[in-house]
Amino acid sequence: MGERPRPPAPGPSAGPGRAALLAATISVVVLCAADALARSYPFGPRTRNVNDLGNQYVPFHAHLWDLVHGRGAGGLLVNWQSGFGASFLPDLGTYLTSPFALLVAVFPRDEIDLAVYVITVLKIACAGAAMAWLLLGLRPGRWWAAGLLGASYGLCGWTVATASYNLMWLDGLIALPLLCLVGEWVLTGRRPLLGVLVVTAAWIANFYTAYMATLAAALVFLLRLWLADLPRRRRLIAAGRAVLTFALGMGLAAPLVTVVYFGSAHASEGRFTRFAPVGTEDLSARLLPTTYSFGSPALFVGTTALLLALALPFHRAAPRRVRAGWTLLVAVVTLSMQWGPTHLLWHAFAEPQGSSYRQTFAVCALLVIAAWHTLSYGPLDRRPLGTAAGLLAVIALVASGSQLVRPIAWPVFLTAAVGALLGLVLLGRERPVLRMAPAALAAVLLIATQLGEATATDALATRTRFGHMDDYAPWGDRQQDQADAIARADGWPRYRTDPGREQTVGNDPLEVGGQGAQYYSSHTSAVLSSTLTALGGGWTSGGRSLQSLDNAVTDAVFSVGARVHSPPDPHQNWFPQDGTGETVTREDVPPLVTVRPSAATGAFGPSPYRNQELLLGARVYTLPRITVLNSAGKRPYRSTDRRQGVRVGAKATITARCRAGSEVYLWAPHFAGTARLAGPSAHGPTGRFRADWRPLTKIAAMERLGTVPDSGRLTIELSPNRMGVVPDQAVGCLDTGRLRTAVRQLKATGATEVTVSGSGGTVRAELPAGSKGVAVVAAPRIAGWRCASGDAALVPAQQYHGLIAVPLDGTSTSVTCAFRPPGLRLGTAVGGGSLAVVAGIGVFGAVRRRRA
């Protein structure tokens, strides 16, 4: 038989609003208490900006603040601050289209970290509230119990361990219960237009986790459809209505979703980890409070919710099909995380970079919904409660073999288990206990248990992350000094102002201003990454986090007329401080658009010095033969892997001969440590190289070390901090006189005026009369650029060694380039069609209601 008609609530009933408020309150209290306990920002001295939160998400929210307040270079189409010009709509759709993101506008610019924290807390609170609302929509029951379980979902292990510092994923946490509510409306034939809009909002807010939430909601809908006592025809109609609702909702979101999809298709590949299922011990451990790891699914939902979910198969008050259906669904979805093909299905068939179990919140939601079905059918008697307690003990026993269970886990778990069991036992009593109604005492006990174990779990995750991940300081004096220096030097679009080689975070231009090569995003284009790598640039995150390149030749090529020089970030403590502050150097550079005599010839080779010359159009480097000796005065062994060069693992020296007065550069992408030019002509104290021992993870950028002494003989002292490789053509000596000559020539033939539209999507340059050859825009030729000379029609831009190129006919005196993100036209067409269908359905429904 199907699910029986809903019985009366086992206690005083109330609307879902009270349950949602309780869930939100518990969530906020736990999050703030946990951060205070962990002494984390804003309640303590420890920064919460770990990993991508500090490197990506806070800077992107800072850029959104700038856009809302009419500041910053670029607009919705092109972000001219990052990567010498990057498509912004894919980043907007990935990181900033949540309605919560706009809250940054009401905070001061220098409180951007507080704004992001408040947004994070609000999202988690709303997720708990949405789940509480859903639970009472699925089954009637005690409002406080729905609020308690809603908070269990909002504060699940996935939230506090993984999503709290990936705040755009929290939109998926909110979306899942809302999409399940849409399924309920479909089943009952209610709110068809609102259902479409909810789906649209979920997919716009963050389509990545919305995809996972949609899969989970579809499974819930199919189970509810199977349990419903409906004729076959009505079931088919309901299924078709669900497909139409979700298709139209996703169709309305298509203008953004397609842009994000094609942005990912043109992005640098990055570094992806191969999936490997975790062991049973670790899987069991993540169900318990106060366990943490980066690479396993955080399934914690609270001991009360776990006990109730374990008791469902044995709770005879619930119909057999309900017990079997929800239990089987939880088991199948949990196992789907551990099997490669279904694991890829959850992640849209793309192996995730970083955390592998991003779909865990779907399992947490199902555990909470199963727990609610147990409780909504009445209090548990001894048999199901005892069986659940036994299963919980087995889980704890299996988990004891995992290294993820720290000593603190046991007292927290045992206290929570006792509190949950006592609270559930009290729910089954009728006589007062300690002159209190059993239900009231049970509510107090269960809520206190939830508060305690969730706070401990969140605090431990925060403290552990801080010790195991890179972390970055919140906005402070360093960032303010950088921003002030950039604002004083800014001259965009006449020239670029680079925030500097000594970066604070991976997206310095977005956080402190300026226009540079630095860029860290899931949509960092492959052409930008490969071009900067060929020019000697450094990167992390498998090529998706590009760094500034402090080089006179590339500054000339990319029109970097001002550059900020900052001391090393004291928060990182990678290198000793030299006591200097921010300084700005200025250079006479060509305009953003230059004219070259002919189209690009040849291709980039292995030497970044020769590649820079190819892009500049002049020979300016001398590449001397170098001699590398270790501390014993002997030649080191050559590398045996694809990193060509000699291996250095301890102090070593490089000697060479160049023209006196030349600038010395060292290119050692697979070297980690310091390099110093011996003698008084050294430029600064050291060169700092930050390559990783894993070649596909991090490579070091080319560094300027100083000038060649009068003797013409230079010595570079290497101090590696791990085994690295020095290439055969590591040293380049730049003839600054030749560079100045090349710059004068490019200025003489380059654009006389360059303008960039407010949206950032259109560049127009006025050229000298009779310009022939090819106009080159100092920006990466990413997909979407269309250009023309004079009044001709726009056509796809050509490429000049990775940059935008426009052929010239000798008669036109202007060049225009416009950018349209790939996928925008397709998405707009799909969105327009979906809007027409939705409008038609709305009109048809209104007419039918009026006739009725």
Image (cartoon, rainbow, N blue to C red):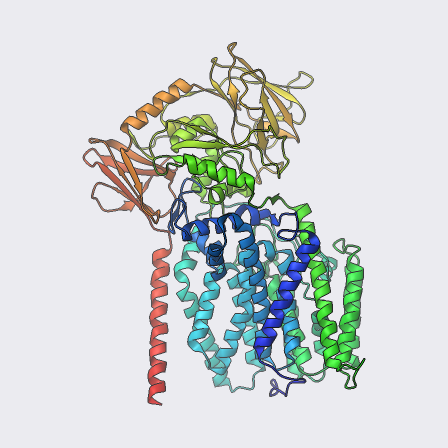
Pick the quarter of the image with the C terminus: bottom left
Q: Position of residue 481 (x, y in %)?
A: 51, 37
823 and 381: which is toward the camera? 381
With 548 as the anchor, is 833 left or right in this view? Answer: left
- Compared with 345, 550 (above or below) is above
709 and 297: which is toward the camera? 709
Q: Quadrant of residue 838?
A: bottom left
Q: Residue at x 63, y 31 (%)?
A: 575
The furthest residue to the left: 811
Pick the quarter of the image with the N terminus: bottom right
* Count of marks placed on residues: 0
Q: Residue at x 56, y 86 (%)?
A: 229
134 and 125: which is toward the camera? 125
Residue 494 in sight? yes
The furthest residue to the top: 711
With 703 as the anchor, is 249 left or right in this view? Answer: left
Q: Position of residue 221 (x, y in %)?
A: 54, 75
The furthest residue to the bottom: 852
Q: Residue at x 61, y 63 (%)?
A: 361
620 and 602: which is toward the camera? 620
- Compared with 711, 66 (above or below) is below
Q: Position of residue 312 (x, y in %)?
A: 70, 77
- Compared with 410, 630 (above or below) is above
Residue 504 in sight? no
Q: Position of residue 302 (x, y in %)?
A: 70, 66
